[in-house]
Amino acid sequence: MSVFSSLGKAFVNGLLLIFSLSAIFPIVWMIYSSFKTQQEFTLNILALPEKWNFSNYVEAFKVGNLHQYFFNSVYNSVISVVLIILLGFVIAYMIARFDFPGKRTIYILFLFGMLIPIHGLLVPVFIEFRNLGLLNQPITLIMPYVAFGLPIVIFLFESYIKQIPREIDEAAIMDGCNTFQIIFRVVFPVATPVISTAIILSFLTAWNEFPFALVLIQNAELRTLPVGLTNFNGQYTVNYPQMMAAMSVTVLPVLVIYLAFYKKIIQGMTAGAVKG
């Protein structure tokens, strides 16, 4: 191995290390800053807290109504993910297994949904929901979450189901299974890796969603965590440690889920490609 090759590898590794630290440090800084007082944070924003202070978390839940926003985020995310997985799997199975008029057009329209930016549809969706009386309802956010979550999930499921041998379906039919039983008792368990990926991606998208939650919900009792964080921003001053505590509560579930299942994401994203 030449000296230039070793220097090149060392330079690339050093560069990657810097990029990794630049991605990890803001999260670490946010967490330890949430234990500082406002005075400590003002004097030195990078220093560690002199005394680990948990009162910011207590105040975040007590004053910032964080528990209500946390429940609303869980409610919207869980119901949206369940609907996205069930609807997406049935639609993808029909597209992958059956031939019917307009099948390709329907599939392309779903894929086209991945190209539409959310911000471009905020005003039309707001007007539509206002005219239909759907603003500020418990199901208000679930509808756009499901609509925008279906395209990528259908794409993943359809690609994976096409790789599953049709003989499995035929064997199930010989055993007396109907279409519903074939989908959920035969094919669904086989597609576990890609389903895990779809669940994680859909949950992260719904949990972090901000534009629709801000525009479609004005009722404070129905707000989600991303919108609830704006309450910690005062007109003249901002209590940064308290805001950091609220942000840590918001980010922690996402980090735990990602660290627990990140291998499933890689397996699900590559499963169809390897088989194809």
Image: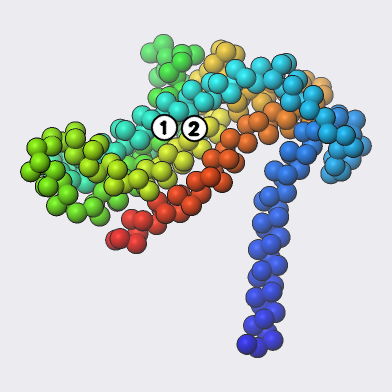
Q: Position of residue 16 (x, y in %)?
A: 65, 63
**To which quarter of the image does residue 105 belong?**
top left
**Left or right of 176: which side holds 198?**
right
Residue 176's place in the image compared with 191, above or below, is above
Residue most toward the bottom?
2
Q: Nearer the viewer, residue 59 or 131?
A: 59
Residue at figure coordinates x 24%, y 44% from the top left: 187
What type is the residue that disc 1 sits on? Answer: Val
- Camera-side mark, 1 or 2: 1
Residue 269's place in the image compared with 41, above or below, is below
Q: CA distance from mark 1 to mark 2?
A: 8 Å
Q: Position of residue 270 (x, y in %)?
A: 39, 57
Labels 1 and 2 touching (C-beta < 8 A): yes
SS class, disc 1: helix
**To which quarter of the image does residue 130 belong?**
top left
Q: Which residue is mark 2?
A: 206
